[in-house]
Amino acid sequence: MVGQNTAVKQTLDLTHLPALPAVAHEILRTFNDEFTTGEDIAGIVEKDPGITARLVAIANSAYFGQRQPVTDMRDIVVRVLGTDNVRGLALAIATANTVNTNALPFGADVFWRDCFIRAEACRLAASLSDEGCNEERALAYTCGFCGDIGLLALATIAPDETQTAVSGIPDSADDDYVARVFEETVGWTPQQATAQLARSWGMPDALCNAYESRAESRAGDYLGTALSIANAVVTALRCSDADTDGEEGATADLPKTVAGAVPPARYVARTEALVSCLLIN
């Protein structure tokens, strides 16, 4: 399925992307260590001032409603955000720091909003399933939040082609439609890019398998299914922005399995505040 766009091929071989920060590699290693604690994660995150500042901002945002400002990273990891959420957020932020988010044709704010919604929807979808082990369930938020990192790579290496592809994709487009447009225009799809980056960077097998099933348009396993549901939620909520009936109208006809993963209106309404935390300089 791979096209002939040389620049993009090099992207996916990682020859044109800066190396992941050391903090990202340390976070990735914790996924394979069952003895990793919240304090361990906090210690890793604190090595990167940029990631630390963004996580502190998120923890103190209106969404979490802290009565007093929280600045201690251990409190943020253990008491406010949670270990699994922090790992996903920190990994995505570190990834974004290696690419040019300004090259995104629809703006970094839109990208991050989708990430927050996809992450929460993936977590909800995973929690509603009887399948999967505790380790996989703990990866659901990260799976959703990092589910479109390939788009960042494509926008960085092939900004013009990515702009052309995105301009031809309506808000209501599903994964298959997006893949077809990118395949024809760029030569790689965001789904393929995400899958290859995840495998190249050594993400946990459960995440890689989920991304690969999405890239290959095949039935996914536990996390792959949750990710598919989460992407359907993101598409529905994008449509709600332009729907005169709002979120309720855009999600009214969703299948039961998808509707159950739609984040609460309170979460969706406050994603703008969460996004602003990631856009601080």
Image (tube, rainbow, N blue to C red):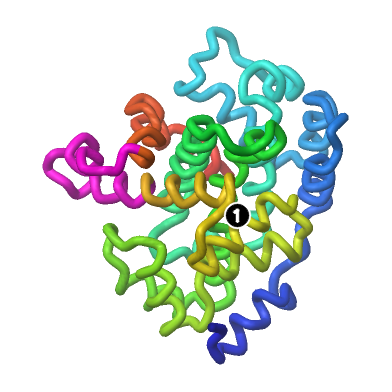
Please, is residue 140 above or below residue 201 in the view? above
Q: Residue furthest left?
A: 244
Looking at the picture, tell me which residue is in the foreground, 1 or 111.
Answer: 1
Provide residue 48's location: percent of width, then percent of height: 77, 41
Please, is residue 1 above or below residue 256 in the view? below
Mostly what secondary structure, the magenta segment?
helix
Binning the other alpha carbons within 10 Å of mark 1 as few (below 14), some (14 to 19) or many (20 upward) gives many
Residue depicted at 53% across the width and 8% down the height: 67
Residue depicted at 55% across the width and 51% down the height: 224
Please, is residue 112 above or below residue 39 in the view? below
Please, is residue 61 above or below residue 68 in the view? below
Determine which quarter of the picture holds residue 201.
bottom right
Q: Residue furthest top?
A: 67
Provide residue 37's location: percent of width, then percent of height: 82, 26
> Helix, strand, or loop for circle 1?
helix
Residue depicted at 27% across the width and 64% down the height: 170
- Asked whether residue 80 appears in the rendered view, the answer is yes
Q: Is residue 248 magenta?
A: yes
Q: Which residue is mark 1?
A: 210
Q: How many marks?
A: 1
Residue depicted at 63% across the width and 38% down the height: 132
Provide residue 220's location: percent of width, then percent of height: 55, 55
Q: Is residue 82 magenta?
A: no
Residues rendered magenta in the picture: 234-256
Q: Is residue 143 left or right of residue 245?
A: right
**Amino acid at pointer 1:** Ala
Q: Is residue 211 left or right of residue 63?
A: right
Provide residue 225's location: percent of width, then percent of height: 51, 49
Q: Considering the image in quadrants, where does the C terminus appear?
A: top right
